[in-house]
């Protein structure tokens, strides 16, 4: 593999990682006003609907970009341009059938699922999400086509466009339905439905973007096929290749998505068995899935997106057998990950109260519950960041099934923990947060064990974990002290003053963390130079 090719892989990976990060940030931002408008019950219905929708996507279309990309790139590498185009057309047919099947299942099974999950009004958002599964199936196939041509730009641009439209339509439709409906029960259900209109509108816009792009590139695609004299591949063999490529990804992703929706299913049913009303259970699910999970997902996305920019080069180095350089890259990406994840977890814990007050001012009924969930469950940031990263490393080293097995083991343990804590104790929603921490923790332990064994890798435990953790602990103490001290100087509970206090405390946190990292000599100059963005500051 040439140096230019390796650079191209890294650049394209970085583009996709950056687009993913931007999309996550947009998603985080628009969910805050939407959550405040929707209320706890609406958030509970919306989050359960999305858990079911993600399962439908995983089974029907989530794997299409990867599968189409892999199969097309392999044919292009052999100069089979006609076969690559034929494969794309067959993939569209496959996506049409899979997407339409998922669409019909959600559309006609919406009332059954509302009854199964013990959620009155769940059928409304599910019926909007039903056609979305079909649109996303077709969209994923289009993205895979361009990724197979080793260009991530169309996928990256479409992701950002999709999320911007999603944000605008979701907030607008949620506000419209909540204001238009008189009954409280109707407000929650129709508000959740309004939020799902944004998902459909965003996916439709992205698909239109690709249709226009294909029309513009029609001449170029015809010219490409003119250089191909290879015999046509049989349609049966193409469908077989698609299915065999899709199945491992479906199994892998289904395990992750099942964990989320199983929590919703278990919590709703077990709380009813314990005599808790449906409204209370739905409200608590809304707090957990929106106020807690939203805050956990953002720093995890930032850490993993930065790491994703380095992962293509790990794959390239492993392919040519440069294992020492693979280990060096792993060192860098692990340290970058924990450099962000550990202080994020500590910061969320010590500033949980002002975060909830500032971001979710209208969700006051379970304010204390949301604060406690974030304080006790913020460590999940570290474990999710690490489990996602180690999963990618194992898959990049051609160990596709290993993280799937680890996730399956962790899911079984997770279900047992959540079911036991919710039913046999009075922890209620806190049982969910314990399960949310233990699931990625078990995956981390098993993945790290496999990575160490596979590459005979000696992890720098001090540089990756212990020194950042000590630095973050000192940072957390200083941050909490600064925030409390400012409150003593002027005791005022207004949102604006809390925001000012929190921003000052975060500035203190940044200074303390950097100083502690320096005092502990956490990273050498060479390590800093290898880290994305950091090396510019070192110079």
Image (cartoon, rainbow, N blue to C red):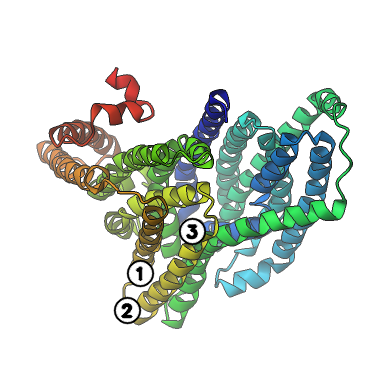
State the CA–CA distance, disc 2 to disc 3: 31 Å
Q: Nearer the viewer, residue 292 or 15?
A: 15
Q: Residue furthest front?
A: 321
Indicate the quadrant where residue 448 lies. bottom left
Q: Give the residue at x 52% y 50%.
A: 395
- The nearer-to-camera label among 1 and 3 is 3
Task: Give whichever of discs 1 and 3 has the lower sequence position.
Answer: 3
Asked if 292 appears above or below 500 in the picture, the reply is below
For disc 3, the marked residue is 403
Asked if 122 appears above or below 395 in the picture, the reply is below
For disc 1, the marked residue is 431
* Element under disc 3: helix
State the CA–CA distance, disc 1 to disc 2: 9 Å
For disc 2, the marked residue is 425
Along the horizontal axis of the image, is 257 left or right of 461?
right
**Could you tell me which quadrant the C terminus lies in?**
top left
| Residue 320 percent across, percent down from the top left | 52, 38
């Amino acid at each position: 593999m040439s140096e230019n090719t390796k650079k191209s892989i890294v650049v394209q990976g970085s583009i996709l990682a950056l687009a993913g990060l931007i999309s996550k940030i947009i998603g985080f931002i628009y969910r805050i006003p939407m959550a405040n408008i929707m209320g706890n019950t609406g958030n509970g219905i919306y989050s359960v609907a999305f858990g079911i929708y993600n399962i439908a996507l995983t089974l029907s279309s989530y794997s299409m970009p990867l599968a189409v990309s892999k199969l097309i790139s392999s044919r292009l590498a052999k100069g089979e341009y006609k076969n690559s185009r034929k494969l794309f057309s067959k993939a569209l047919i496959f996506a049409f059938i899979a997407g339409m099947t998922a669409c019909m299942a959600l559309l006609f099974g919406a009332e059954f699922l509302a009854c199964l999950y013990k959620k009155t009004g769940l059928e409304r958002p599910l019926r909007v999400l039903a056609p979305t599964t079909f649109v996303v199936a077709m969209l994923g196939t289009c993205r895979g086509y361009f990724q197979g041509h080793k260009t991530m730009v169309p996928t990256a641009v479409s992701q950002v466009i999709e999320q911007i439209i999603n944000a605008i339509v979701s907030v607008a439709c949620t506000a419209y339905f909540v204001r238009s409906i008189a009954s409280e029960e109707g407000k929650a259900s129709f508000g959740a439905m309004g939020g799902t209109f944004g998902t459909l509108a965003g996916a439709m816009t992205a698909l239109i973007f690709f249709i226009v792009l294909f029309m513009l590139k029609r001449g170029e695609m015809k010219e490409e096929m003119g250089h191909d004299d290879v015999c046509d591949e049989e349609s049966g063999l193409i469908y077989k290749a698609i299915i065999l490529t899709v199945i491992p990804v479906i199994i892998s992703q289904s395990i992750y998505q099942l964990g989320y929706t199983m929590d919703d299913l278990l919590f709703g049913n077990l709380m009813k068995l314990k005599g808790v009303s449906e409204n209370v259970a739905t409200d608590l699910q809304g707090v957990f899935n929106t106020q807690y999970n939203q805050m956990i997902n953002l720093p995890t996305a930032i850490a993993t997106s930065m790491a994703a920019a380095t992962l293509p080069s790990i794959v390239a180095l492993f392919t040519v057998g440069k294992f020492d350089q693979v280990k060096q890259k792993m060192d860098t990406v692990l340290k970058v990950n924990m450099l962000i994840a550990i202080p994020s977890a500590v910061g969320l814990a010590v500033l949980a109260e002002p975060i909830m007050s500032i971001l979710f001012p209208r969700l006051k009924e379970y304010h204390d519950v949301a604060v406690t969930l974030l304080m006790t469950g913020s460590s999940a940031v570290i474990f999710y960041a690490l489990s996602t990263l180690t999963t990618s490393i194992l898959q990049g080293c051609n160990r596709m099934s290993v993280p799937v097995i680890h996730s399956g083991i962790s899911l079984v343990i997770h279900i047992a923990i959540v079911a036991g804590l919710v039913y046999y104790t009075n922890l209620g929603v806190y049982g969910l947060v314990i399960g949310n921490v233990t699931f990625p923790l078990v995956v981390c332990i098993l993945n790290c064990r496999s990575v160490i064994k596979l590459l005979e890798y000696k992890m720098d435990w001090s540089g990756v974990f212990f020194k950042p953790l000590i630095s973050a602990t000192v940072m957390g103490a200083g941050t909490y002290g600064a925030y409390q001290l400012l409150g003593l100087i002027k005791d005022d509970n207004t949102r604006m003053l809390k925001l000012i206090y929190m921003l000052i405390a975060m500035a203190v946190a940044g200074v303390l963390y950097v100083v502690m990292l320096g005092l502990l000599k956490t990273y050498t100059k060479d390590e800093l130079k290898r880290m994305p963005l950091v090396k510019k500051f070192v110079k």
